[in-house]
Image: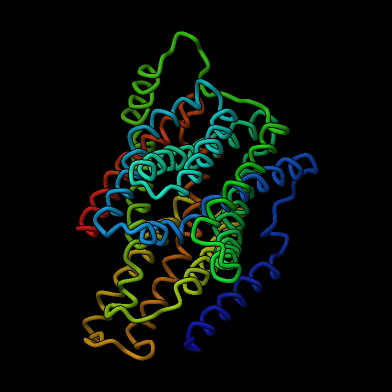
Amino acid sequence: MEAFYYLVFGALSAVVLGIELSKTTKDRINTSPAFNSFKNNYLVVYSLMMAGDWLQGPYVYFLYTTYGFGKGDIGQLFIAGFGSSMLFGTIVGSLADKQGRRRACVTYCITYILSCITKHSPQYRILMIGRILGGIATSLLFSSFESWLVAEHNKRGFEQQWLSLTFSKAIFLGNGLVAILSGLFGNLLVDTFQLGPVAPFDAAACFLAIGMAIIMSSWSENYGDPSENKDLLAQFRGAAVAIASDEKIALLGAIQSLFEGSMYTFVFLWTPALSPNDEEIPHGFIFATFMLASMLGSSLASRLMARSSPRVESYMQIVFVVSSASLLLPIVSSFLVPPPKEKAEGISFSSCLQILGFCTFEACVGIFWPSIMKMRSQYIPEEARSTIMNFFRIPLNIFVCIVLYNVSY
């Protein structure tokens, strides 16, 4: 493997380690033992949930190809997943405010476990059911857990600033360290032990089951608006009115959808960008490098949110500018340094520039997640938190389906 990959990975590792070790009292938030116990419990559960998600990611497409499906069929399966998240996921996720967030988190575990089980079947219809279940689970993952955390944090009377500590640690572990370890563990199951491409899905189901057991044994229930006279349609109307009447909530939804839309587009297209002529690249190692860059971003976010200045709304403007510039790099580099028209033996100079730009974007993603979580906790009303968060995902899912359709056909 090219020395450049090791150099970038080593440099990022050194920077992340340096940031974590050099934190001063200004960068740390003094908390209570009760809060630390609460935070650690949530982080264990969140890490297990994300492990269940990350283990599946690298092998979904590969599994479908081993069953003999072509690019068009696989594209339809992915579109079904995001379409399900937009349609059914919005309904199921929104029920969390009325039926209970803890119950919704347990539903996520059950739904995703069932989705994993469907991967054992080579039948297209069964796999389609699995994608639909996976789409519903995704909506629950990105709304119910955060909604439960915010409500429970406030119910227990913890300081509001401490919430940002939980958010930054959750992203550092769940979207960084756990992602890397899940990639390595999945590679161990498939390549080293040669258990086949279904093995990571079985492992994911086990992690989800463990997390569900912890939720059921240690989490208490909380609600948004549990009033009996309010049906689902009334919840949707209330959420729509809240978004329409408060400009900050509407803008927050636009910010989230636009940034996540660019993030998903990046997920689909970074491989062809780095290997335009089908060059062999170390996908797993590059993925681990990107996750390390995300950990760097979450480390920076924890420092920024531990201080009263700058405000989240201020530094996020810089994050968006840097993100845009980093994703422009492939276009600029292709003009300045035209990529080779034939399959290259080693990594090209253009690809080196793109990897550096992509790592910068992933660092921005690492800052984005805990920061947007903090902003949601401040601006979204508690009684309709899960419903509004799922509303935010509707334009995102439409955008992703359009991108997927154009990539697949």
In the image, taking residue 404 as reference, residue 24 lies left or right, namely right
Residue 80 in the figure: left or right of residue 210: left
243 with respect to 51 (left or right)? left
- Residue 347 lies, with reference to residue 94, above or below; the image says below
User: Quadrant of residue 181 in the image?
Assistant: bottom right
Pick the residue in front: 86 or 241: 86
Residue 407 appears at what percent x and percent y? 24, 60
Q: Position of residue 82 (x, y in %)?
A: 34, 44
Task: Specify whether residue 300 is in view.
Answer: no
Residue 110, by quadrant, is top right
The answer to whether any part of residue 346 appears in the image is yes
- Residue at the outermost bottom position: 345
Q: Classify 325 as above or below 310.
A: below
Q: Nearer the viewer, residue 99 or 28?
A: 99
Give residue 247's position: percent from left, percent from top: 34, 35
* Image point (40%, 77%), residue name: 355
The quadrant in which residue 270 appears is bottom left
